[in-house]
Image: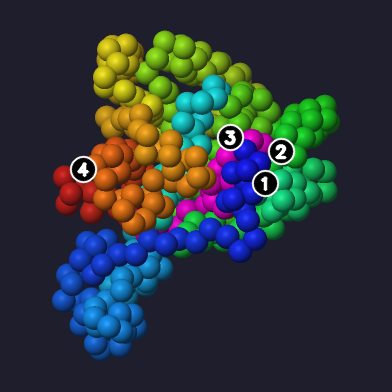
Amino acid sequence: MNRLRDRVYAPGSEKQLELSFNVRSAAEMVGRSEKLIRDAEADGRLPEPQKDPETGRRTGYSLAEVNRMREVFGTLPHRAPGDPPLVMAVQNFKGGVGKSTLVTHLAQYFALKGYRVCVIDCDSQASTTAVFGLNPDVDVDEDEDTLYPFFRHGGPATLHYALRATYWPGIALIPANLGLYDAEYEFAARMARDHTFVLDKLRDGVESIQDQFDIVLLDPPPALGMLSLSVLRAANALLIPAPPNNIDFASTAHFLKMMAATLGEISEHGGARSYSFVKIVATKMDDQKSAHVAIKRMMDAVFPHDVLQSVLKDSAEIDNATANLKTVYELTGPARRTETHKRCRTYLDAVGREVETLIRKTWPSHHSDLRKEGIL
């Protein structure tokens, strides 16, 4: 881990988004024809594209430039001011189920679509923070940059102090590091004096910044402690990753049972909380393993209306990207042209699309478009 961090976080090696889109891909992303893009460049609505001095061809568009096109053509998918921001927790109290993998890939999927996304790392292990290019041990101060100051007595009134822009256009991050674990002790001390503190503090913080975003993604720790309970209170939607094996599926069932009991007890004391949707997504699925296939079939039978149709299959592409603190969406060059990469992108995009549809259903301003698409 130290050698990996020395390489990834070496001086002058700050992460940058190296994705580039040709005019055809840009047109598909923007939802307009190549001709309209060229016309807008010709009449000054869009800046002149950069060109290779030798060939005269466009060198490609960055994601920021694609979003500029969306702005000009009115195709940014933002929610309307009257639509509620979607605050989704990707939660399971068992580690190793693909929680941070889902958070980072979903955030980047939404950013590629043009949404405004905030990722809040609530896990002191800080895997999500690391993937977004920050060294939790060096670049993040728990007393200034994480959620911890917000939870302390007399701390900041909002979470604006902790918001960081990332190298991904459209994604802001509230990072974490090991010091965030002290928040559990802070909760315990405060609970003795204020029983509602643990229930509402994080939700109040999220509400203080959520108007700037379409989607807020919460990455909680893999335990049902005070911080995780706060995440459950702050979220208005839940996505539960569950690999299709006996141990993880049993753990997920126990998590749901414990979560229902805990939230039920809280609601009896005036702390009711409802969710726009609660969905389970099968992760790390291997179709070649008969046990996985059988347990996935059982998951569908036990939770017939609550399991996503899309499955995040086990892929070496995710493992290889994670080994370099990257995501599959960040890979460039020859790595993007392999069959393994294409298959993995297909799985990730399918999960992203299904979750995106669930989110858009919560926004009244999107209902007419969803009807045109045959979804509503």
Q: For the residue marked with disc 2, what is the amino acid?
A: Leu
- x 23%, y 70%: residue: 23
Q: To which residue does mark 4 refer?
A: 375
How far apart are the alpha carbons under marks 2 and 4?
43 Å
Asked which secondary structure carries label 1, the reply is: loop
Front residue of 84 and 137: 137
Residue highlighted by disc 2: 178
- Are the residues tagged 1 and 2 within 8 Å (C-beta)? yes
Residue receiving disc 1: 136
Residue, x 44% and y 43% (percent of image)? 321
Q: Earlier in the sequence, mark 1 or mark 3?
A: 1
Work out whether residue 131 or residue 202 is closer to the camera in this orientation and state it: 131
Cβ atoms under marks 3 and 4 closer than 8 Å = no
In this rendering, which labeled residue sits more in front, label 3 or label 2? 2
Q: Is label 1 or label 3 in front? A: 1
Residue numbers of the magenta segment:
113-133
Marks 1 and 4: which is nearer the front? 1
Q: Earlier in the sequence, mark 3 or mark 2?
A: 2
Residue tagged 3 = 220
Q: Secondary structure at mark 4?
A: loop
The part of the image, by quadrant, that contains residue 300 is top left
**What SS does tag 2 mark?**
helix
**Distance from Cα at disc 1 to Cα at disc 2:** 8 Å
Q: Quadrant of the C terminus?
A: top left
Picture residue at 35% right of the left edge, 33% below the top: 315
